[in-house]
Image (cartoon, rainbow, N blue to C red):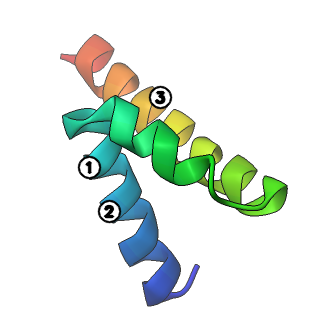
């Protein structure tokens, strides 16, 4: 993944955590492929956090 995609993923994940409604509004403006990618980023981030919490 290139730096631009990492920055975009990070921005979207932070947006989802801070204002999920705004996150949904933003990703609903994306084309279907980009929307799926954004949701995948969020899902993977949440899985990572969940695994970390279980490991403690």
Q: Return the x and y of residue 34 as percentages of the image width and height.
A: 71, 62
Residue at which label 3 appears = 47
Residue 40 is left or right of residue 43, and the answer is: right
Q: Return the x and y of residue 32 as percentages of the image width and height.
A: 81, 54
Q: Is residue 56 above or below residue 16?
A: above
The label nearer to you, 2 versus 3, is 2
Q: Quadrant of residue 53?
A: top left
Q: Return the x and y of residue 2 as percentages of the image width and height.
A: 54, 87
Q: Along the polypeptide, which appears first: circle 2 or circle 3? A: 2
Q: Is residue 32 above or below residue 1?
A: above
**For the residues bearing labels 1 and 2, Cβ distance under 8 angstroms:** yes
Residue at which label 2 appears = 11
Residue 37, disc: none
Q: Secondary structure at mark 3?
A: helix
The label nearer to you, 1 versus 3, is 1
Q: Secondary structure at mark 1?
A: helix
* Residue depicted at 42% across the width and 30% down the height: 46
Q: Label 2 to label 3, Cα distance in Å?
A: 17 Å
Q: Return the x and y of residue 12 as percentages of the image width and height.
A: 39, 55
Residue at which label 1 appears = 14
Residue found farthest to the bottom: 3
Residue 13 is left or right of residue 32, and the answer is: left
Q: Label 1 to label 3, Cα distance in Å?
A: 15 Å
Where does the C terminus fall, quadrant-wise?
A: top left
* Residue depicted at 62% across the width and 46% down the height: 28
Q: Along the polypeptide, which appears first: circle 1 or circle 3? A: 1
Number of other residues with Cα within 10 Å of mark 3, as a class: few under 14, some 14 to 19, many 20 or more: few
State the residue in front, 44 or 35: 35
* Residue depicted at 34% across the width and 62% down the height: 10
Residue found farthest to the right: 32
């Amino acid at each position: 993944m290139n730096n631009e995609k990492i920055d975009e993923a990070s921005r979207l994940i932070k947006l989802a955590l801070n204002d999920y409604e705004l996150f949904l509004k933003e990703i609903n403006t994306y084309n279907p492929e980009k929307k799926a990618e954004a949701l995948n980023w969020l899902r993977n981030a949440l899985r990572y956090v969940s695994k970390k919490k279980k490991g403690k």
